[in-house]
Amino acid sequence: MTSIMFKGAKIISTGSAIPSTKLSNHEISEIVQTSDEWIFTRTGIKERRVLQNLDQSIIDLAVAASNKALNKISMDANEIDLIILATSSPDDLFGSASKIQSKIGATNAVAFDLTAACSGFVIALVTASQFLQTGSYRNVLIIGADVLSKWTDWSDRSTCILFGDAAGAAILQSCDVNNNSVLGFQLNTNGNYSNHLSIAYKQGSYPHPKLNLYQGSFKYIAMNGKEVYKFAVFQVPLSILNCLKSLNISVTEVDWLLLHQANERILSAIADKLSIDSSKVISNLDKYGNTSAASIPLALDEELEQSKISTNDIIVIAGFGAGLTWGTIVLRW
Ligand code: COA
């Protein structure tokens, strides 16, 4: 899918933040019946970061990632017009983006949350580029942040081995249409399978005998791992191929494949299906596990820090996860 474009859009800075506490596979094997060997061979994960400090929340991670992105380019937060927080684990059901707006001092920005689980950052990137390419806004801050450790059933060995906490941010700016970097996208949802991965509503108790209603909370992460695995390996390559085809870009022209960091075996299977060499596949799963909406911006920030990505490189970014929702965005760096 391409859009009506009056202006171009490009990422001008990135930042990321992780909690200081590491949780290794070995430590998890002391909580549930599993082993470092089982987890590593099935997922590629060695350890993950978890937010342990009671005084810290997703807001602190998101603010730290955002400030790093702002500081790298010496941008005043007042210049930001829009903040989109992609998260499924906000501090506040009404949204956490406004707290980030306040804490970084982005007084001129409107801020809202976007819930699309592990596809959240890709959809935030698409949404931000729409506002920029139509000329509505000049500077947009997008953040992918999740603290799924708060929503993990730590007695369920099939899910508690997978997830970690983190935040990643990117600042996008409008530019001349000839310098446009966000080339195109392809997004999908199939809600028929939403029960394969969810943090479902939990019916609570009646607040008062005279009131015929109940108050709720949320359950922990529930997942059908096999089905999610099959879905990702089948649908994501199709989305990438469709997106590249619509842009007249061949798979051989792809310099970097940046997939949502869910499972090393999923990354390899998708790359194999596309005949993309493993040297082009960005992966940091071993250190962080699946950090949901944060995984793509965290990996992108790390690659940029290591100066691996060069000007004009074609980067294919694909997210997939709960919804089920999946999609691709193609950038020319
Ligand atoms: N340690 C040891 N054994 C485990 C285990 C663990 N952490 N988790 C499950 N097992 C056991 C199962 O109980 C089962 O035992 P059984 O054969 O005696 O019944 C066996 O290992 C195989 O389980 P299965 O669920 O078939 O494993 P799998 O090969 O499908 O791997 C996942 C499980 C979760 C690693 C894999 O399905 C997966 O990665 N799916 C995608 C999940 C994902 O990425 N979700 C997020 C998307 S955004």
Image (cartoon, rainbow, N blue to C red):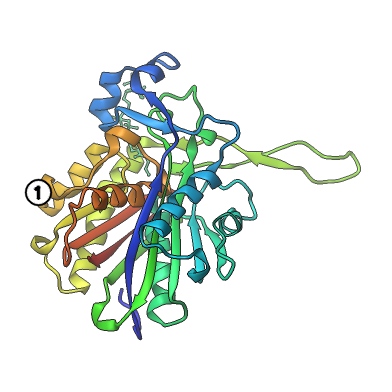
Q: Which structural element holds mark 1?
A: loop
| Picture residue at 49% right of the left edge, 49% below the top | 62
Q: Identify which residue, 307 or 288, lies in the foreground.
A: 307
| Picture residue at 29% right of the left edge, 43% below the top | 230
Q: Identify which residue, 235 or 271, lies in the foreground.
A: 271
Q: Could you tell me which quadrant the C terminus lies in?
A: bottom left
Q: Is residue 280 visible?
A: yes
Q: Quadrant of ligand 1?
A: top left
Relative image position of residue 39 (x, y in whole percent):
30, 25
Vertical comparison of 147 with 301: above or below = above
Relative image position of residue 109 (x, y in whole percent):
55, 68
In the picture of the structure, the residue carrying the numbered disc 1 is: 277
Q: Could you tell me which quadrant the N terminus lies in?
A: bottom left
For the view shown, which residue lies furthest in the front direction?
74
Taking the image as shown, residue 125 lies to the left or right of residue 214, namely left
Q: Is residue 323 visible?
A: no
Relative image position of residue 287 (x, y in whole percent):
31, 33
Relative image position of residue 226 (x, y in whole percent):
33, 36
Badge 1 amino acid: Asp
| Picture residue at 54% right of the left edge, 57% below the top | 104
The answer to whether the beta carbon of the residue marked 1 is less than 8 Å from any atom of ligand 1 is no
| Picture residue at 42% right of the left edge, 69% below the top | 128
Q: Identify which residue, 94 or 190, lies in the foreground.
A: 94
Q: Quadrant of residue 138?
A: bottom left
How many dots with numbers? 1
Vertical comparison of 188 with 2: above or below = above
